[in-house]
Amino acid sequence: MPSTIIVGIDFGTTFSGAAWAISKRPEDIQVITNWESETNGCSDRGKCPTHLQYGDIDHETPWGYNVPTDKDLVRWFKLLLLDEADLPSAVVENPQFKEVREQQGRLKTSPIELVACFLRSLWKHCMENITRALGSGEVASCRFHIVMTVPAIWPHYVQARMKSAADLAGMLQERGTNFSRGAPTLEFLSEPEAAALAALAEMHPRPDIKEDDIIIVCDAGGGTADLISYQVDKASSFRLRECVAGEGGLCGGIFVDQNFDDLITDKMGGSPWKGLDSADKRKFMKEIWENGIKSQFSGNNRKFCAEIPEGYLPDGAMGKRKRSQIITLDRDDLLSAFSPVIHEICGLVEKQKDAITAEHFSPPKFIILVGGFGCCRYLFNELVEAYPDSTILNPASEKSYIVQSRICRMGYGFDLNEPWDSSKHHPKDKYWDSLDEIYRASGQMEWFFRKGDVLDGASPSTHEYQRLLTANSSLDIEETLWFCTSDCLPSRKTDSVQKLCSIKWIKRVDLRELEMGYNSAGQIYYKLNYEIQVIVNGPELRIKVYHNKRKVAAGQVTVEWR
């Protein structure tokens, strides 16, 4: 049995990283570093910037730390995977998001192609590091399994786009001699759960962790903040189960960066960056802000001095010289940058705590901050003050733990045309089925998972269907999977019920093989019976179609996301 190399990829809005392990030594997790870099001191970091050099998007596009400082950047392109209707207005109106949208238009490329360009280089770098560690012979003999993170709050259609990008990047190509090892398998994991895989293991063994203790994990990243809560099912082996539905929002560190940019603009009485090279602004934002003020501010009364590049003095014997101004930023100044985002994250924590208290009658014992923005001192201090009955932690680890179950974040269901029942159906839904010769109610919802249900990730939800066909009927079968985020799910399709995807099946069957029936008009029809199985496992959703107890070939079934 060949070994499997598991590669975890955390594709983030601002920074991305990767790690790997081989199945025969699963505890030996190797974090990818050794980045190619234009600047010193970056090659050994655990993550690289999610950046591309603006220009031709191809196999040679500089990426990450390797983008020259004097070149324009393409960044935030991960957010382009979302339909604009699913983005908050604050993101759509953000100058940086507008810039990447304009760059995409000028480059005449799609969001999937931008993501694929970055993933292609990241995957190549991963493979080079893995091959250096194991040797080309062992790598060629192994199967590959890839785990990619996605924000827990993002809709399922993003996974289809991420998979397309991974395929376009060459990550899913068949491997081994004569393709004997097959194509790598791809799995998606929610970002807060992936972060918890590392952070929670740091807590075991720990004497103050008992059975039924509840732990909130807040993954505050560059673009999103995702929260997930676990209850300790078995303290000795640290088995956990998700205990309430998670929370999330687009309130990551990038929005603090934009607030700081606005603060500087306001302080300088206009546009301080006008006439500056983009490299000079990036250097200021990295050295003075990212590595200085942003990481040091804790909410206290400390004042910070910032040297703001205003422009350039006339060329002289010294060449081009920068003109700058030093300004002082006090606590109130910096609170204007931090507080709107911090308050939004704290609001998500409060909602999670309220759900836990209502369900389990006790507050969380621990609140764990992870992610890039999770290291923010001010965020940590605000949570310490707000939740004196909980222990606030900001650990780091690369171990693992076991999650036995997850909580469903929305309702999933199919719509049915049921036999009419005047006692329960709405008159607007009534129609006459001329083939079956009965009245039916259209658009009645059958919910197979509800918000808050426990998901074990293994048991499928199976749905039986019968379609009546005539000799002239199309054999293209289509069913729609719907979702609803309401706590109380409607019994019929309403405005709160939204389309998730269409499941299309090109049926290849001889009508003569089906059971036949007649109506009173002598019209012949054929009964096609089939099943649809759905597995929801965190952010992953897997769909299979069965006919005559046999799985329909994948090539005959397509899933089209809305």
Image (spheres, helix red, strand yellow):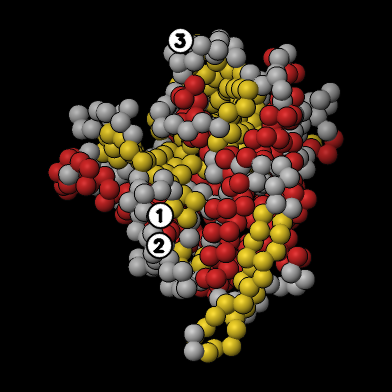
The residue that label 3 is drawn on is: 236
The residue that label 2 is drawn on is: 39
- Identified by mark 1, the residue type is Cys
Quarter of the image with the N terminus is top left
Whole-Å distance between the Cαs marked 3 and 2? 46 Å
The vertical placement of 32 against 60, above or below, is above
The residue that label 1 is drawn on is: 42
Classify residue 147 as left or right of residue 392.
left
- Nearest the viewer among 329 and 29 is 329
Find numbered disc 1 in the image and state the secondary structure of the residue it sits on. loop
Mark 2 and mark 1 residues within 8 Å of each other at the beta carbon: yes
Whole-Å distance between the Cαs marked 2 and 1? 7 Å
- Identified by mark 3, the residue type is Ser
Classify residue 434 as left or right of residue 548.
right
Image coordinates for residue 434, horizontal then vertical, percent? 70, 39
Classify residue 174 as left or right of residue 345.
left
Find numbered disc 3 in the image and state the secondary structure of the residue it sits on. loop
Whole-Å distance between the Cαs marked 1 and 3? 39 Å
Image coordinates for residue 296, horizontal then vertical, percent? 61, 46
Find numbered disc 2 in the image and state the secondary structure of the residue it sits on. loop
Image coordinates for residue 259, horizontal then vertical, percent? 70, 56
Which residue shows up at 27% across the image and 28% down it? 25
Label 3 Cα crowd, 10 Å radius (few <14 / some 14-19 / many 20+): few
- Nearest the viewer among 73 and 485 is 73
Could you tell me if residue 505 is visible in this image?
no
- Identified by mark 2, the residue type is Thr
Label 1 Cα crowd, 10 Å radius (few <14 / some 14-19 / many 20+): some
Could you tell me if residue 380 is visible in this image?
yes
Answer with the quarter of the image where residue 359 lies: top right
Count of numbered marks: 3
Q: Closer to the observer: label 3 or label 2?
A: 2
Of callouts 1 and 3, the N-terminal one: 1
